[in-house]
Amino acid sequence: MIKKLLPKSPLGIAFFTITAILTLSPEARRLVRTTAVKGLASIMSLTDQVKGMTSNTQNLLPASSESNPVFTYDTNVEPAEYTEKNMDSGSAFNVLNDNYLQSQFTEIKNELH
């Protein structure tokens, strides 16, 4: 019965042993707790140092107008008036004005009616 409860892999044996030691020994729990607190404190200290270093380097960089552009909008400008001159005549072609298509439409219309 006990053989079924015991782990068979080396990793399982290690976890079982660590769990048993932490369960039975208050000194081991205290050691693990203090080590975890010291590790977390060192990680927090390291992140504070990195934050300090990045803020110091940002203060050393010169402030340039290219990195922080100021956008202004002229609201007094009138929109350009639409005229045929403003349109590029070569770029657009209205297919509905094509004579061939209009003749095809009239033939279809005559056949259906």
Image (cartoon, grey):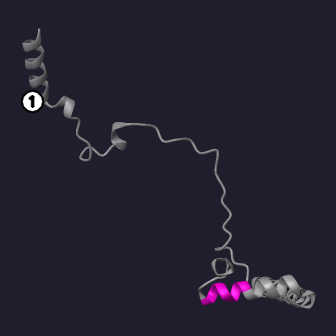
Q: Residue 53, how many percent across, how many down?
A: 78, 88
Residue, disc 1 = 100
Q: Which residues are the magenta region?
A: 10-16
Image quarter for residue 107? top left
Residue 19 as seen in the image, left or right of residue 3: right
Toward the top, the furthest residue is: 113
Residue that appears at 10% across and 19% down: 108
Task: Tell me the kind of residue under disc 1.
Answer: Tyr
Residue 89 as seen in the image, left or right of residue 76: left
Q: Nearer the viewer, residue 8 or 22?
A: 8
Above or below, 67 relative to 25: above
Q: Nearer the viewer, residue 59 or 51?
A: 51
Q: Nearer the viewer, residue 54 or 9?
A: 9
- For label 1, count other residues whose C-alpha is less than 10 Å away and answer few (under 14), some (14-19) or many (20+): few
Q: Residue 109, how many percent across, how many down?
A: 12, 15
Residue that appears at 9% across and 30% down: 100
Q: Secondary structure at mark 1?
A: helix
Image quarter for residue 7? bottom right
Residue 91 as seen in the image, left or right of residue 2: left
Asked if residue 99 shows in the view, the reply is yes
Residue 24 in the magenta stretch? The answer is no
The quadrant of the picture occupied by the C terminus is top left
